[in-house]
Amino acid sequence: MKVAVIFNRARGKETEMKQGPLAELLIERYESMPRQLQMASRYVLDHPDDVALMSMREQANRAGVSHSTMMRLARTLGLKSYEDIRALYARELRNPHAEIELSAPVDIGGDDQGLFSRIGSMSDTLAAQIASLGEYVSAKQLLAAGDALAGARRLFCLGGQAEHAVAHHFAHTLSFLGEDVILLDSGGGTGVEPLRHAGAGDAILVVGLEPYARTSVEIARKAADLGVTLVAVTDSPVSPLARVAHHSLIVTARSQSGFRSVVPAVAAGELLVGLIADQRGIDVEGALSRAKEELAAFEVYWKP
């Protein structure tokens, strides 16, 4: 592995720093990279041994970026995946004098540089928001909410406006697993009739992000009054849904484009489906196979 000599002004002497096989290319392209890629590049430059020995996800965590950023760094350097970077650094550890060959790096300069940076920033933000659901506090919220929903006699779900898509995806995915879940339509007055006989032992998932749909808040409060266990997927611990919910999952709705993003809420819903399936002992692969066969009999799927 190459060694660079750096003059340490604080100590008044020269120090040695290892350089990996991609160091020169990373330094050459550093200034033209978006900030997230610069952070990933800085980590690779500063920790060449770790690149060879640690997993990509662990490196991403230490670099303060998402794992997708590490993958984009590899493609920017003309490699197919980050594993190719790790392989180069591992080979360098074994044989410091090995020669490397790289394909032409992806050009991110010129007129497309701003767009490239914009797309990278947007995707990194989404990836980080979803990854945060696995952190300790969010994981505890998910486990508690999953237990409450999995143990319910009947399941309901509700989402107003853009959040209706989140509730619909939750209900649709569970139905594919053979589970009954009632999707309440807050857009019309008759869509909440199934709640008339709901009570203790039932549970409802309500999705609400600012600005909160009035009907969603009112229906959630009514369900709580009936004794229904309320699980809220919302964006603040002091939102009107969180204040009446038995369990809350706090997600972010911010996006790099200025509009509300439902992607973290959709991810939370999918995680809840997975927890419900685990708690109820559902054979996911078997249930999905049966559902596809049943729908195929109705010619739901396109055939060439």
Image (cartoon, rainbow, N blue to C red):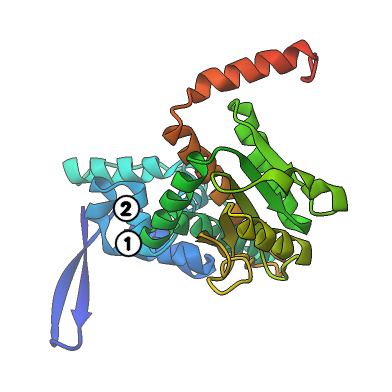
Q: Number of labelled discs?
A: 2
Q: Using the image, determine if residue 42 lies above or below residue 297.
A: below
Q: Amino acid at mark 1?
A: Arg
In the rendered structure, the answer to whether residue 293 lies left or right of residue 71 reads: right
Query: Looking at the rendering, in which quadrant would you find the C terminus?
Result: top right
Q: Using the image, determine if residue 242 lies above or below residue 298.
A: below
Q: Which quarter of the figure has residue 270?
A: top right
Whether residues under marks 2 and 1 lie with C-beta atoms below 8 angstroms apart, the answer is yes
* x, y percent for residue 289: 59, 17
Q: Is residue 70 in view?
A: no
**Element at label 2:** helix
Q: Is residue 119 in view?
A: yes
* x, y percent for residue 101: 39, 41
Q: Amino acid at mark 2?
A: Glu
Residue hosting label 1: 62
Q: Residue furthest top?
A: 297
In the rendered structure, the answer to whether residue 191 lies left or right of residue 179 reads: right
- Residue 58: mark in rendering: 2
In the rendered structure, the answer to whether residue 193 lies left or right of residue 26 reads: right
* x, y percent for residue 275: 46, 40
134 or 184, nearer to the observer: 184
Measured in 3D between alpha carbons, the distance from the residue under mark 2 to the one under mark 1, in whole angstroms, is 6 Å
Q: Residue at x 70, y 67 (%)?
A: 257
